[in-house]
Amino acid sequence: MTFMFSRRAAVFASMMAALVPLSQAQAQATHKIRYEEVVRSVLYVPMYVGIQKGMFKEAGIEMSMKTSQGTDKGMAALLSGSADIVLIGPEASIYVANSESPVKPIVFAGLTATDGFLLMGRKPEPNFDWKQLQGSKIMSFRPGSNPDIFLEAALRKKGLDPKKDVKLVSNIGPAARTGAWLAGQNDYATFLEPEASSLEKQGKAFPLGSVGKEAGMVDYTVFTTTDAYLKKNRAAVQAWTQAVAKAQQYTAAAPAGELADLVAEYFTGVNKAELVSAIERYQQLQLWKKTPMVEKQAMDQLQEMLVQGGVLEAGKKVDYARFVDMGLVQSLAQK
């Protein structure tokens, strides 16, 4: 599997290096796309890099961007028609595929290789063992959401039953989590960057482990549209996919300091040292995909995690082809 992934990454690297500037006709084509990201996070640096380096503009995309504050809200925007493309967890598309919704979401490109949340404690624990979580309260997320599912998977791999051995607190909204932690709620919590580095600098929380590292390399956030939008606007989604692929290659090769300078405007209030630290941490954890390919094996693994988490019946797993279309990604490699 590792060899196959490395080979695909090499093919994509060669392909992207060989890409010539868009033709005049392509450059003049404008695709107006309403985009929503799930949250604002360093986890999505490749997307911000693509915007700042003009890769989406070069692809003929005129983008409006909003932050949903949750995969459920991002999916709601997609299904209601108020967003054209959303960056959310792939689990949402599985849930909708099993529903009676006439609108079907389609995953067409991946951005992150796994969960970017860090397990944080209230004091440094140099010799931390996940089994120390036994009997504790951990601030998590909405049941069935990707952050919750990945944390449960990590706990199980460490020999803990997330339903019995710990108390996962799931009733605190994304925007209220930092405040709740600072108010003294819960023993442990999971945080994305840059919140993790900021809390660490303040001496309010200390990183103990990586959820994604323990859960495994399973696509965590993906670009998703609807089947109808993809059918009607395939050229626009193709342009988007090409811009994402270029941004991923650029991000993979750039040093943390350069990336921090590029994306600084998306993180006002975070100083450069904290931003560089956050980016370096994610680089070390290899959280950013080098290509937009979302593999069937990863989605099969995700669905097994959903079954183990009790949010998907084993008999209701969704065929990969029903909610994932890698045709646009594959077409890039053929150019």
Image (cartoon, rainbow, N blue to C red):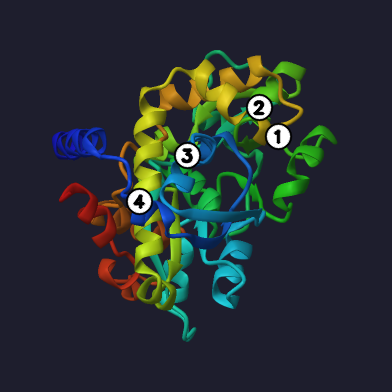
Compare marks 4 and 2 and give the one earlier in the sequence: 4
Give the crowd class for mark 4: few <14, some 14-19, many >=20 residues within 10 Å: few
User: Secondary structure under badge 3?
Assistant: helix
Residue 325 higher or lower than 65, as above or below: below
Please state which amino acid type lies under the numbered disc 1: Asp
Tell me the amino acid under the disc marked 3: Gly
Q: Position of residue 325 (x, y in %)?
A: 29, 64
Residue matched to label 3 = 50
| Label 2 to label 1: alpha-carbon separation | 7 Å
Which residue is rendered at x = 18% and y = 40% of the image?
8
Task: List the single residue furthest toward the front.
Answer: 24
Residue 309, position as x, y percentages in the image: 46, 58
In this rendering, position of residue 138 left or right of residue 104: right
Badge 2: residue crowd in 10 Å (few <14, some 14–19, many ≥20)? many
Q: Which mark is residue 187?
A: 1
For the residues labelled 1 and 3, the Cα–Cα distance comes to: 38 Å
Find the residue positioned furthest to the right. Answer: 183
Q: Nearer the viewer, mark 4 or mark 3?
A: 4
Query: Disc 4 vs disc 3: Cβ atoms closer than 8 Å?
Result: no
Tell me which numbered mark, 1 or 3, is placed earlier along the sequence: 3
Q: Which residue is mark 4?
A: 24
Comes first in the chain, label 2 or label 1: 2
> How far apart are labels 4 and 1 at the CA level?
57 Å
Do labels 4 and 2 touch, CB within 8 Å? Answer: no
Front residue (pair 139, 293): 293
Q: CA distance from mark 4 to mark 3?
A: 20 Å
Image vertical order of residue 245 relative to residue 229, above or below: above
On the question of residue 109 being in view, the answer is no
**Front tag of 1 and 3:** 3
